[in-house]
């Protein structure tokens, strides 16, 4: 059956001066988290966003509707902090799933509680999930995250696959001398379970500002450590996806397709020229880049009676000002004030 053609309302898409068009929206639903990954936040946590500054479920729903209805957004990923600890999550997903044209809906989660939530999320209309897992060792997991929850993450992965949130992808950040020796074992684990693994280079987005380029495990080093798998170049075009993917000969994924592994070289192999992302923080700020140092306050507009088209116009203006690249290698590069957990990774 042909899908109904729904014309965009208002003045157009989220374009920028470099010809990119943002169709992929990352929505952070909270800056809070039940883990403390060392590359993300300190053991004692952070000063959380005051509740009254956080968008309500209805406010999130309205902004998502504006993004789909008026700005041409086709993909929405919920993230955080940890999105599964947002109480209204299932309802927010259900609202998004009722939009036309229906956006693709996914979540990036640490997997804790996913075993229980996967079914209701699937029923609400969630399509897919990415679960973060940096180690196969429960003891190392505890060191890395300051919480003893490794088993919960594995159960969350299995629950997601059972509920049909597929392909289930795993995000892994490698740290030198800590878990970089685990790259082949993590890939083997993913292949054995039908999950798709993506390694992500560590970025200067930690709240502690301790990132050190020389300590980072590069995409080249990751690929080197995967040599025993005889990876083959993937013929499928990367398009706007940040991950470069390789085929793993001899393995198929859960859908019976050739198994793949991805590497997101955000620092050493930046993909800014193809970026199609726009970001909304849990307190209603639009960011045109992970590394942006400025934001546009949609919450103030919402709470001061702006129309949908006023909001859409402010969002378009925010994206028009997007820079050509993240500039991590510029001597003038400044890490944004917001850490990853408050931006939404
Ligand atoms: N709490 C959820 C999770 O961990 O999946 C969602 C939010 S988390 C900020 C999203 C992703 O960002 C995770 O895969 C995490 O590993 C990754 N991440 C966090 N800090 C990072 C950093 N400094 N560099 C690269 N990736 C990072
Ligand atoms: Fe929490 Fe995700 Fe940050 Fe880890 S990476 S502390 S799970 S927000």
Image (cartoon, grey):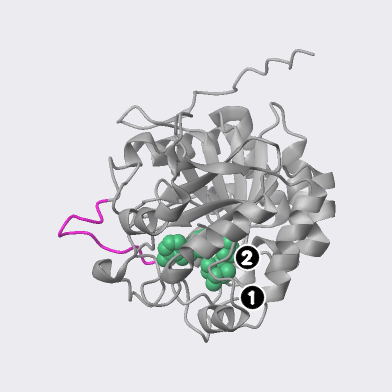
The residue indicated by pointer 2 is 110
Q: Which x, y percent locates residue 269?
A: 31, 47
Q: Which of 7 and 44 is in front in this view?
A: 44
Q: Quadrant of residue 39?
A: bottom left
Q: Magenta region, mostly helix, strand or loop?
A: loop
Say if mark 2 contacts mark 1, CB within 8 Å: yes
Q: In this view, does 207 lie to the left or right of 125?
A: left
Q: Note whether ligand 2 is within 8 Å of mark 2.
A: yes
Going from N to C along the chain, the mark reached first, 2 or 1, is 1
Can residue 31 be seen?
Answer: no
Front residue of this view, candidates 274 and 190: 190
The region drawn magenta spans 327-338
Q: Quadrant of the N terminus?
A: top right
Image coords of residue 225 (percent x, y) = 39, 59
Q: Does the magenta stretch include residue 276?
A: no
Which residue was labeled with disc 1? 34
Mark 1 and ligand 2: say if the CB distance to the nearest ligand atom is below 8 Å. yes
Disc 1 secondary structure class: loop
């Amino acid at each position: 059956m042909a899908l109904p053609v729904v014309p965009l309302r208002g003045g157009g898409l989220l374009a920028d001066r470099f010809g990119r068009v943002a169709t992929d929206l990352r929505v952070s639903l909270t800056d809070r988290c039940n883990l403390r990954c060392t590359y993300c936040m300190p053991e004692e946590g952070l000063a959380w966003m005051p509740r009254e500054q956080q968008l309500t479920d209805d406010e999130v729903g309205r902004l998502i509707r504006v993004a789909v209805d008026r700005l041409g957004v086709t993909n929405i990923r919920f993230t955080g902090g940890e999105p599964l600890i947002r109480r209204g999550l299932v309802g927010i997903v259900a609202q998004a799933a009722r939009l036309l044209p229906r956006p693709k809906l996914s979540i990036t989660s640490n997997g804790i509680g996913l075993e229980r939530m996967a079914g209701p999320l699937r029923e609400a209309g969630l399509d897919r999930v990415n679960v973060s897992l940096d180690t196969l060792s429960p003891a190392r997991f505890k060191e890395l995250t300051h919480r003893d929850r490794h088993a919960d993450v594995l159960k969350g992965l299995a629950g997601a696959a059972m509920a049909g949130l597929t392909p289930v992808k795993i995000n892994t950040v490698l740290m030198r001398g800590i878990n970089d020796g685990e790259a082949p074992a993590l890939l083997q684990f993913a292949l054995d379970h039908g999950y798709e693994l993506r390694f992500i280079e560590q970025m200067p987005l930690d709240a502690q500002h301790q990132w050190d380029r020389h300590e980072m495990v590069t995409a080249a080093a990751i690929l080197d450590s995967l040599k025993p798998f005889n990876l083959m170049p993937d013929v499928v075009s990367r398009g706007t996806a940040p991950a470069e993917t390789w085929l793993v000969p001899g393995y198929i994924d859960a859908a019976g397709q050739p198994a793949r592994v991805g590497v997101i070289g955000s620092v050493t192999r930046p993909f800014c020229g193809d970026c199609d992302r726009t970001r909304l923080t849990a307190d209603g700020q639009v960011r045109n880049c992970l590394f942006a140092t400025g934001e546009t306050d949609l919450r103030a507009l919402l709470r001061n009676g702006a129309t949908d088209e006023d909001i859409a116009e402010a969002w378009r203006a925010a994206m028009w000002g997007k820079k050509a690249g993240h500039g991590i290698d510029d001597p003038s590069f400044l890490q944004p004030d917001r850490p990853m957990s408050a931006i939404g990774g």
